[in-house]
Amino acid sequence: MRRRLLAALSGAALAISLAACSGEGAGGGGDTSSAKPGDLTIGVSMPTQTSERWIADGNSVKEKLQAKGYKVDLQYAGDDIPTQSQQIDQMITQGADVLVIAPIDGTALSGQLQAAAAAKIPVISYDRLIRNSPNVSFYVSFDNYKVGVAQADALLVGLGLLTKDGAKGTATGPFNVELFAGSLDDNNAGFFFNGAMDTLKPYFDAGTLKVKSGQTKIEQAAILRWQQETAQKRMEDLLTSSYNDGSKVDGVLSPFDGLSRGIITALQNAGYRGGAKMPVVTGQDAEVASVKLINDGVQSSTVFKDTRLLAEQAVIAAEAFLRKEEPKANETKAYDNGVKVVPAFLLPVQTVYKEDIKSVLIDSGYLTEQEVAAGRAG
Ligand code: BGC
C-alpha cells in the first residue's frame, strides 16, 4: 500500500516536472509575470452541467480568459467527486498556471490542493469555498449570507408580511411554511440557511410563521447535491406527513431554482394550482425555466446572481496571481475554511419578482424575452 502510494506520488511529481519543462505554460512555479498570455493555461473546474448557472459560469470564465489570449482548460465533473479530483489532478500535471475551482464537495479536494501548492499553482475558489485546506489562495463569490436574507425577505413579501421596501405588510398570518436547504457539503448552503433563518426568527417567535412538519434544522431541510428530484420527494413526504388534515402550505423557502421546480411539481401534483392556491415559493439563480414560472405567476421570486460579473472577478484574481500580486479582497473575515480565513471578493445579489424580469434580466442581456417565454435557453 505504502509502496503504491510512493509510486503514485513520484509519478505525479514526475508528471509535474515534465509538464514544467515542456514549455506548455510556465507551470505555476515558473515566472508567469513575464510570460505571454498565450503561453499560460488556466484550469477551470466546474461541478455540473445539469444546472444552467454553472454552464453560464464556465462559458463566461472561458470566454473572458480567451479574449485576453490565455489558454483555458474547462472541465465539468458531472457532480461526481472522484471525476472532479481526477480532472484537477490532470490540470496540475499538464502544467496549469492558475486553477479556478467550484467544488462539488467543498471538503474533498485537500489532496489536489496540496499538489497544486507543491507545484506553486494559485487556487481560486469559485463561488463555493474549498474547505479544510491551507492552499486556497482566494475566494470569489456573492454575499452568500445576504442571499439567504433575500430569500427570507422574498418569502415574507410574497406572504404579505413585508413590503418590498422593508415596511410591515398588511397580512397577519399565521402562515404554514416549510424550509429547504442546499447540499450540506457545499459551504454556501449554511450561509443561505443561516441568513434566511436569522431573518425569519422573529416571525417564528411571534407565531406568525409555523413549520408544521417541525423540520427546522438544516440537516432535516438539506437536499444532497441540490437535486430537483430529491426536493420533489421531500415535498411530497411533507405534504403526506403534515398536511393530510386539510391544512395548507402557504410558503416554501427554497434556496435554488432547481429545488423550487421539484417543490412546485410536488405541490401541483397534490392539487395546488393557479396563482391563488400555489404557495409562495422562493428560489435562486434566475434559471430560465424558473423565470418562466415566475412570469406565469407560479414561482414567486428568485435571487439573481450575475455570473458574468463573478467570471470577471475570477479573471481579475487570476491575472493578479499571474503577475505575482495578491488580488484585492473586500471581505477578509467571514470565510473561514476550517484551516484559514480565505480572503474574498463578494458581489451583491438582487431579488427578482415578476415585475423585475424585464429590467433586471432581459434589459441586461442575461436572458432574452424569447427565452423567458419558452422557458428554455438558446
Ligand atoms: C450556488 C448556487 C447554486 C447552488 C446549486 C451553490 O453553491 O451558490 O448559486 O444554486 O450551488 O448549484
Image (spheres, helix red, strand yellow):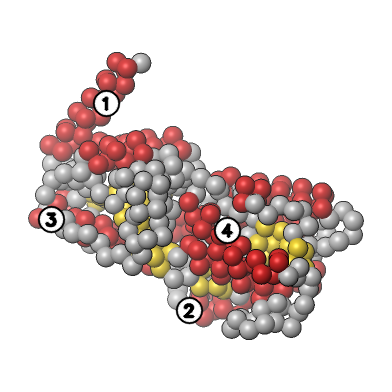
Pointer 3 and pointer 2: residues touching (CB < 8 Å)?
no
Q: Quadrant of residue 376?
A: bottom right
**Inter-mark Cα distance, 2 to 1:** 52 Å
The residue beneath circle 2 is 363
> Is the residue marked 4 within 8 Å of ligand 1, measured from its CB?
no
Please identify, in this view, whether the residue under mark 3 or under mark 1 is nearer the observer: 1
Q: Going from the N terminus, do you reach mark 4 or mark 1 first?
A: 1
- Looking at the rendered structure, the kind of residue marked 2 is Asp
Which label's residue is closer to the chain start, 3 or 1?
1
Disc 1 is placed on an element classified as helix
Look at discs 2 and 4 and give the one toward the viewer.
4
Please tell me the numbered disc located at residue 177: none
Disc 2 or 1, which lies upstream in sequence? 1
Residue highlighted by disc 4: 193
Residue under the point 51% across and 73% down: 350
Q: Amino acid at mark 3?
A: Ser
**Mark 3 → mark 1, Cα distance in angstroms:** 29 Å
> Callout 2 environment at 10 Å: few (<14), some (14 to 19), or many (20+)?
few
* Amino acid type of the residue tagged 1 in the rendering: Leu
Tell me the number on the disc at residue 33: 3
Label 3 CB sits under 8 Å from any ligand 1 atom: no
Instruction: Indicate which disc, 3 or 2, sits on the residue closer to the N terminus.
Output: 3
Dot placed on the residue nearer the N-terminal end, 2 or 4: 4
- Indicate the position of residue 208 as horizontal and vertical percent values: 75, 70
Q: Amino acid at mark 4?
A: Phe
Q: Which mark is residue 9?
A: 1
